[in-house]
């Protein structure tokens, strides 16, 4: 069947497989965006009285996320109780949080440490990821702590990118910003995975293939969320067909903001399929 290749690629791609764990975009990311926004605001306020820091919050968060695979070693005294809705437990650590204080002291001993302000923000992000990972793994019986760690780090990375998009001239509504951020964040590791397979192409070809794979999974999720009926094979085939249109229509929306979504979809459909 036409969708077998895509489904197998999804199964083989660890980065795309995480989409099934991320679930709908409504719950997790707004909470994660709020967490980062509050953390960055307090960091900037602290920096005003101590301007010696040379990093910005995005760089500090990126450092924490890059090392997220090692974060199970971050000790937390307790994880929040499982939330009523997935992703609402991105609670801001208090300024005297003992877990954050302990981790900030550990970071201060690392070669890539920053100022006290920088170390504290990085510790906040790392401890928050560790707590979120514990929450995820305790609320989903089939999710390990390591997988929860990866999901939590992805949520924050996507939230960070969504906030960057929201602050740019290409900003749209929150949901559109999230979906774009999710695709960009997940396309990068998937393109890397493809580059290390036997049928790897050029860097551009690998990126395009990865982007369409991620867009296909996103489209399946979108169709399911809209209550579309049909067999699993039918939904996958439809999503695989529509994914290139989705990607092109979103680019048209950024290039021609005066166009309606329907106009961009029609133009993209003609460009993709004639």
Image (cartoon, rainbow, N blue to C red):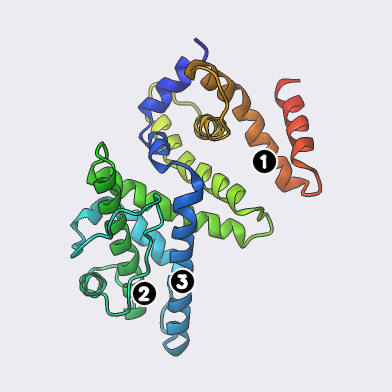
Q: Counting other residues with Cα less than 10 Å from the Cα at mark 1, is it few (<14), some (14-19), or many (20 or more)?
A: some
Check contact, mark 2 vs mark 3: CB within 8 A.
no
Disc 3 secondary structure class: helix
Q: Position of residue 61 (x, y in %)?
A: 40, 63
The residue positioned 30% from the left and 48% from the top of the image is 136
Frontmost of labels 2 and 1 is: 1
Residue extending farthest to the front is 84
Q: CA distance from mark 1 to mark 3?
A: 30 Å
Mark 3, Cα crowd under 10 Å, few <14 / some 14-19 / many 20+, is few
Residue located beneath label 2 in the image:
118
Q: Position of residue 109 (x, y in %)?
A: 21, 72
Closest to the camera, between mark 1 and mark 3, is 3
Write down the residue under mark 1.
Answer: 250
- What is the crowding at mark 2: few (fewer than 14 residues within 10 Å), some, or many (at least 20)? many
Give whichever of discs 2 and 3 has the lower sequence position: 3
Residue under pointer 3: 38
What residue is rendered at 39% in x and 66% in y?
Answer: 60
């Amino acid at each position: 069947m036409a969708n077998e290749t895509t489904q197998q690629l999804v199964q083989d791609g660890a980065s795309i497989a995480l989409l099934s764990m991320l679930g709908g975009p409504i719950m997790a990311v707004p909470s994660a965006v709020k967490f980062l926004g509050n953390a960055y605001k307090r960091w900037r306020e602290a920096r005003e009285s101590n301007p010696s820091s040379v990093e910005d919050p995005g760089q500090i968060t990126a450092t924490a996320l890059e090392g997220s695979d090692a974060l199970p070693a971050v000790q937390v005294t307790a994880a929040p109780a499982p939330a009523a809705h997935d992703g609402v437990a991105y609670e801001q650590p208090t300024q005297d949080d003992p877990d954050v204080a302990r981790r900030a002291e550990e970071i201060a001993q690392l070669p890539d440490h920053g100022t006290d302000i920088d170390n504290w923000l990085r510790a906040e992000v790392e401890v928050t990821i560790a707590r979120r990972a514990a929450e995820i793994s305790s609320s989903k019986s089939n999710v390990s702590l390591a997988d929860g760690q990866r999901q939590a780090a992805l949520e924050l990375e996507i939230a960070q990118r969504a906030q960057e998009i929201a602050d740019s001239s290409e900003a749209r509504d929150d949901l559109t910003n999230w979906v774009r951020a999710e695709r960009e964040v997940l396309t990068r590791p998937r393109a890397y995975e493809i580059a290390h397979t036997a049928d790897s192409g050029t860097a551009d070809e690998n990126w395009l293939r990865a982007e369409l794979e991620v867009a296909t999974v996103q489209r399946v999720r979108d169709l399911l969320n809209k209550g579309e009926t049909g067999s699993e094979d039918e939904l996958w085939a439809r999503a695989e067909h529509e994914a290139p249109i989705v990607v092109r229509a979103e680019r048209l929306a950024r290039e021609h903001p005066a166009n309606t979504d329907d106009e961009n979809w029609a133009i993209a459909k003609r460009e993709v399929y004639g």
